[in-house]
Amino acid sequence: MESVVKYILNLGSGIFLPIVMILLGLIIKMKPKKAITSGLTLGIAFTAMNMVLGFMFTSISPAASAFVKNTGINLSAIDVGWAPMAAIAWAWPYGLAVFPLQIGINLLMLALKWTDCLNVDLWNVWGKIFTATLVAAVTGSVPLAFVAVIIQIVLELKSGDITQKQIYEITKIPGVACTHPMLIQAAILAPINRLLDFVPGINKININAQQLKEKIGVFGENSVMGFIVGALIAVFAGFDLKGVLNTAMQVATALVLFPMVAKLFMQALAPIADAAGTFMKKRFKGREIHIGLDWPFMAGQAEIWVAAILLVPFELVIAVLMSKASLNTVIPLAGIVNVIIIVPALVVTGGNLIRMIILGLIGTPIFLAIATSFAPITTSLAKAVGTIEIPKGQFIAFFGVEMPELRWALAHGLNIIHGEIVGFIALIGFFGLFFWYAKYMKKRDMGETLDSEISVSKTQKI
C-alpha cells in the first residue's frame, strides 16, 4: 500500500491533483464529462505553469551563479530548490501517516465550524512532512515532529480562511482558497505592511501592474519589462551580448506566458467551485465552503513576476554582503525568483508593487539566514536518504523554504525540552502575530478603512 501511495505522489502535482479533483467532482455530483474535463484542464494548467516556471528559473539561475562567482565570494551551500527537499520528506518513515492526519483534522475543523476550507491540496503534504523531518532532526523526537505537523495543518486551514476574500479580489476565481504554507508567512509581512502605512511617501503610493502600464506605456508591457529586467540581470552577471539577449528574451517570454496559462486555472476551477458550492450548501447550510489549492492559480498576476524578478539582483547583493559578515553561506539559485515571499506580499498589500518589493527586500535576509541555519541538517538528511551526491565540504540548502520563520520557531521552540528558550519565545511570538494578522485581514474583508488608507484614497494613485 505504501509503495502504491508513493508511486502516485511521485507522479507530481500535474497528475495527482487532477485525479483528486476528478474524484471530488464525481463526489459532489458533477456530470462525469464535466468532472473529467475540469480535472484534465487543471492538470494542463499545472503542467503548463510548471513548464513556464522551470523555463524562468533556468533562465535566471545561470546569471545568478555567474554574478556570485564574479564577486569571488565562496558560498558553500547551494540552493537546490524544493524537489530534493520533497525527496527527503518522502523518505521519512512516518510520512504517510500525515495524510489521514490532515484529512481528519480538516473534517473535524469543518464539523466544528473552525474553518470553511476543504483542503484538497494533498500533494503538498510533503511540506508538512518536511517540517516534521526538521523538527525531528533538531529535537530528536518523533512525537514533537507530529505536534509540528498538527500546528502547520491548522495554520494552513486558518490561513486559507483569512486570505480567501483578498485572493478572490485579486484573481476573481470564485470558491477557492490558497492553503499553501507560503501564505502563513503573511503573518510576518502584514505587520510590516501596516508599519509602512506610517512612512511618508510610501503611504501615498499604490501602484499595480495595470497602473504601471498606463503610466510608462510600452515599457509597462510584460514583454518589454521582462526583456529589460532579464537583460539587466545578465549584464550584472557579466554575460556577453549573445548571453544578455538570450536571457532577456527568455525572461520576456516567461512573463508573457504566465497570464495565458493562468486563464486555464479559471477555466478548470470555476465549474468545480460552482458544483462544490451547491453540494456544500446542502450539507453545511448557511456556510460558504472553499476549496483549498496550491498557489499557482494566482500565478497569472503580473505583479508577482515584476516584483520577484526585480528582487533578484538585490537578493544576490544581500547574499554577498551577509556572507562577508559571516551571516550567510547560501548562494540562492533554484529559488532565486522567490515567489515564496512575493505571493504572500501580493495578498497583504493588495498588489501594491512598491510595497511588495520592500517586503521582499526585508524578508530576503531572513530567508538566507534560516536557509544557512538549516543547511547542515538538510545536507545530512540528503546524505542519509541518498537522493543527492554531495561533495565533501559542500552543503545543500533550501533558500525558498516556505514560512521560514515558523519552521525555525517550530524546530527550536519545540526543543525547549533541551533548553532552547529563544526558539520557544519565537514560537509564542509567531502565534501572537498570527492572531493579530487574522484580525487585521478581517477588518480589510469588512471594508473597514485604516488610517493610512484614508490618506491614500485622498491622493492620486500613481
Image: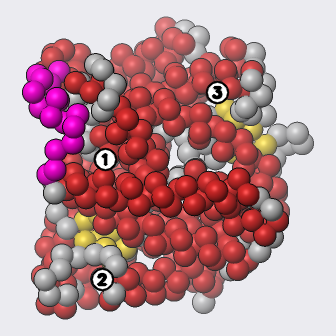
Residue at mark 3: 319
* Marker count (numbered): 3
Q: Which mark is residue 417?
A: none
Question: Percent position (x, y) of residue 233?
Answer: 49, 18
| Crowd around label 1: few <14 · some 14–19 · many ≥20 (10 Å) | many
- Of mark 2 and mark 3, the one earlier in the sequence is 2
**Residue drawn at x 65%, y 69% as measured from the top left:** 132
Q: Nearer the viewer, residue 285 or 268?
A: 285
The verdict on residue 102 being magenta is no
| Residue 113 marker | 2
Q: Residues within 10 Å of mark 2 (few under 14, many from 20)?
A: few
Q: Earlier in the sequence, mark 3 or mark 1?
A: 3
Element type where label 1 sits in the image:
helix
Residue 187 in picture, x, y percent from top left:
43, 52
- Quarter-wise, where is residue 10 in the image? bottom right
Residue range (magenta): 447-462
**Horizontal relation, residue 101 to residue 35: left or right:** right
Residue 100 visible here: yes
The image quadrant that residue 345 belongs to is top left
